Amino acid sequence: MASRLIETCPHCGKPLDGKFNSSTYPAFTSLRFTPSQRVLLDTLLPYIGQWIANSVILDKLYGHRSDGGPLNARGTLRSLVFQSNQRLEGTGYKIESQSGKGGDDDTYRRLILVEI
């Protein structure tokens, strides 16, 4: 399943540039995130509303580690999504999950804009 980068901010409609991440995105600048939460958001944010495979997110989180990350990386990601959603409360955003999207057994995540 191919995802396409968004070109305009769904929040304000302004064109996006290469500096689009969780540190500069207006809805998130006042929030405190752990480094892992920032990697998760930075992976999902350019593709708001589109499904991204867990394998892509896990590679961003742990691909640089020689040990490949925690033994239960998928369980760790579930916890990370839960904790991130707690921090996102009141921003109008949340991370959704869906299993088996696209006919495979991977789980997919997406960051969406929700009504508050």
Image (cartoon, rainbow, N blue to C red):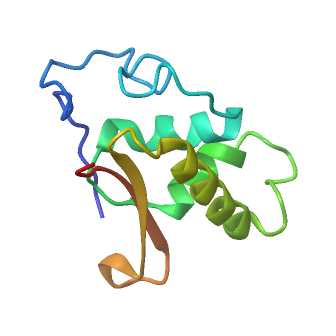
Residue at point 21%, 36% (across, down): 6
Residue at point 56%, 51% (across, down): 86
Image: 103 above or below 73: below
Q: Nearer the viewer, residue 30 or 44?
A: 30
Marks counted in the figure total 0
Residue at point 15%, 18% (across, down): 14
Image: 42 above or below 96: above
Q: Is residue 99 rendered to the left or right of residue 39?
A: left
Q: Nearer the viewer, residue 45 or 102?
A: 45
- Residue 63: horizontal and vertical position, in percent? 69, 46
Residue 81 sits in quarter: bottom right
Q: Is residue 62 rendered to the left or right of residue 85?
A: right
Q: Is residue 94 rendered to the left or right of residue 35?
A: left
Residue 82 sits in quarter: bottom right
- Residue 55: horizontal and vertical position, in percent? 55, 61
Residue 96 sits in quarter: bottom left
- Residue 108: horizontal and vertical position, in percent? 43, 67
Residue at point 30%, 64% (across, down): 1
